[in-house]
Image (cartoon, coloured by chain):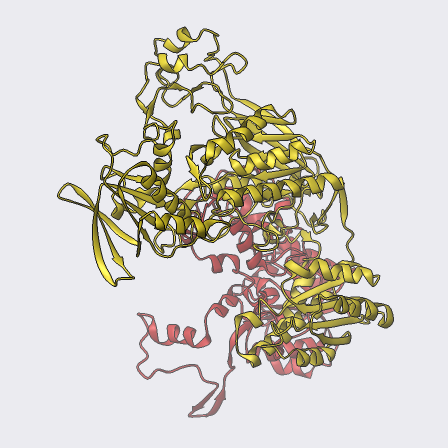
Amino acid sequence: MSGQKIGVYVCHCGSNINGVVNCSKVAEEAAQLDGVVVSKDYKYMCSDPGQEMIKADIKEKGLDRVVVAACSPRMHEPTFRKALEGGGLNGYLLEMANIREHVSWVTKDKEEATKKALALVKGAVNRVKYHQPIEEKEVPVNDATLVIGAGIAGIQAALQVAEAGHKVYLIEKKQYIGGNMAKFDKTFPTLDCAACILTPKMVDVGQNPNIELYTSSEVIKVDGYVGNFTVTVKEKPRYINHEKCTGCGDCATACIMKNRIPHEFDEGLSKRGAAYIPFPQAVPLKAVIDDQNCLLLTRKKCTLACVKACGRKAINFNQHETIHEFNVGSIILATGFDLFDAKRAPQYGYGRYPNVINGLQFERMTNASGPTSGHILLEDGTEPKSVAIIHCVGSRDENYNKYCSRVCCMSSVKFAHMVKDHTDAEVYEFYIDMRTFGKGYEEFYNRVQEEGVHFIRGKGAEVAQKNGRLVVKAEDTLLGQYREIPVDLVILNTALEPRVDAEKVAQTLGISRSADGFFLESHIKLDPVTTTTDGIYLAGCCQSPKDIPDSVAQGSAAASQSLAIIATGKVKISPISASVDENQCAGCRICVGLCPYRAIKLNEETLRAEINQAVCKGCGTCAAACPSGAIKVSHFDNDQLLAQIEGVLA
Amino acid sequence: MANKLKLAIYWAAACGGCDVAILDTDEKILNIAEAADIVLWPIAMDFKYEDLYKMEPGSIDVCLYNGAVRTSEQEELARALRDRSNVMVAFGACASWGGIPGLANLVTREEIFNTVYKETVTTINEDDIRPATNYQGSHGELHLPKIYDRVWSLDQVVDVDYYVPGCPPTPETIWTAVEAIVTGNLPPKGSVIGGTKSLCDTCEREKTEKKITQFKRPFEIIADPKKCLLEQGLVCCGPVTRDGCGHRCTNNNMPCRGCYGPSEKVNDQGARLLNAIASIMDVKDEKSAAELAATWEDPAGTAYRFGLPKSLIFDYKKGGK
């Protein structure tokens, strides 16, 4: 590895790096390293002049390798690869040393920082000597899109792709679409009714010829890669023939289990039968048979009242689950959120005391088509005279979720307005901080303050029962006083959490989750819609808690990502991949089950492992596990890594 | 008999099994004796070191050096033999990678001394006498070899031409090596006498899905003789170990211990095995991983049974960095 001409460029990143690292010293010392012919430091390497400097040096000084010591390669590796290509070098003859996130941002000690920056540069210089040119591959794109989850974010994304003239497969686990938003009554800050704005979109989904809707369905397998995914979907039997069912509800009226099963759509506030219509505006508006509670399906014994009641003979208990397979170019994941179960915070009495409800239950209560026909009622059927609303139940709490659920302040303010609007009750809101940051939100908050709601700054600590009445205990931090406020109804505004099956979904799709459990975006600021797996995009609350405007915006953004790759017609796939050295592979099979992308198969004839290059993402799992060192990941091989380590330690 | 090979055999930090293994070539030992003049073999013949020191550089054709280097005497002899030998062979696992004595590198010399000269229940050493390099006896001063801080493989001390793996090397492997030397049909310098791939390549046990749900030790189960031992929960070093031993252990339903050292492309036998085992543990999260891993008895001693001094962190030349 001699005779190479390496250029080293140390970026100041304004004062981001140079404020802590002595960049000119790093550049000076790097100039002394074996093989380095140019070593410079510059204010902004990613700027035009910075990139031009690299291009010019490649041409004039004949550089054949480049090291850029700057920020994380996540952001600017593509930038500098392009700069190398502009100078006539293969982009993979670049190595970046991360002296910002790994150095200047994590210490104030200038001397140590400079030392570490130099060590990383030495590692990078040592490593780049072993880099080989790699050509990127292009593959054609399938123009269909899979959307998983038909809440508002998924619906928005599906409609937008479909309206642009492309096929969409929309998969929904529940028997109907609309997600959580379909349960809401009014929406903040403008107080439009959720159904009025959502139902037209739901109907559009049902009618758009480009959208193939699969309800009661789940994605069980995803193979392939960006542009060419093969998706397997399992559709559960509904025991209803959709062609024949008109959604009249005769079966629901006839079902002998009628009014015995808590209705999920009403958050348990009403009861339904085993055969039922989910809600009046449901799409598709078809009856549902609940296989967990139907007597025929669970105990094989029933009078079959529903079958007799159905004039259209739409009920068919011989249906089986069906498996569908689709080929799509991109996948939009919009699986939404689960509500924090308030029973996990027993201090609030949820499930123990009557008249302690959560936010979604309140939404159902105020909804005109809900269980109380829009009346706010206590369990005894009377109207409350005072109502407490507690923010941050399960959010901003070390014991449950550290994050802010973002929507609860505004929905709590909306709840207060609804109580004021529907009843004469006094309303007490217990909040830590009031976060009303969106368009028109602060104005809405001001309006509700003027309606006479009592805002108490202090987290509701406990809900107790005293003399047969609920009492909310809290420290009012503005008064500096402990308070106990007796109320009739308590609304717990609970956290938005990742779906319970988020891990399973993440594994099925081969994507990652962040520490809070939500799906991980590729860059929280600059790439909040794409995942670390190319061709899989995120929309709505599955990425982080969001309100409706943000969910819709992200749904649109995900749709345009999908449309962008359809429009290009082809995608570049990462050329970094693993390969098996047949002369070393002993066929032990350790690697076969490990590949998260299922790219490895054992060739039964040669008894050697084989890696499908088109599917391999170059993650390195197999190379690390391969006991005989037969698997090599291009751009991350042993020679490169060991040289880098030696450089860092030198 | 002037054309006979001049052969030296030396025993350093080892159990003596390698020397015995040479005898285990049975009647072929006669062929060896016919082809070679033995100029040094402390276990079998009476030579003095001073006889060795009188020999000229290059006067020994082949030296089979078994055992690791752990004392100043062993180093001195390694250097003396290297100077006088045209071909230096690291003979057996200890000379090649440190072997079983190399496990001493898991602890310090002081810890070992404390255990041996102080802490064991049967030790009575009230004066806390420790090994010393000088001893003033009634007949004068005695000099004893120094015990080093760590154990070295032979190639970390002197230049090595070939490696004969095994604990001990099998008679077949020894014979292959001897034949190559006698006929002059030598492989490239640095070669290891054995296969290039791992043991799994020629292992005929049925392999299906690799998943470890529970670690087992050989005495705990009677392993299915047809199925992959690793898949039965026995930690088998076969996947990381060089082929060429003739499957002595696995043929007898015992997992491979790794004595033929790392296969060709493996740079750290123990780390490779740890990585591979960790990858196939059937666990969901960190907690279950920790629970399952805790049931693996002595992972360091299993994975590095023969190769600790040649692992990445210990692999540097004596006196180097």
Task: Looking at the picture, tell me which residue is in the foreground, B15 or A589.
Answer: A589
Q: Is residue B192 shown to the viewer in this render?
A: yes
Q: Quadrant of the N terminus of chain A?
A: bottom right
Task: Name the spot of residue A109 as percent of width and height, x first.
Answer: 53, 79
Task: Name the spot of residue A335 as percent of width and height, x first.
Answer: 51, 38
Which chain wears red?
A: B
A467 relative to A271, above or below: below
- Taking the spot 66% from the left edge, 77% from the top edge, the residue there is A23
A179 relative to B51, above or below: above
Residue A640, quarter of picture: bottom right
Q: Quadrant of the C terminus of chain A?
A: bottom right
With A419 as the anchor, is A122 left or right in this view? right
With B109 as the anchor, is B83 left or right in this view? right
Q: Is residue B289 shown to the viewer in this render?
A: no
Q: Colour of chain A?
A: yellow
All told, the count of numbered labels is 0
A232 relative to B143, above or below: above
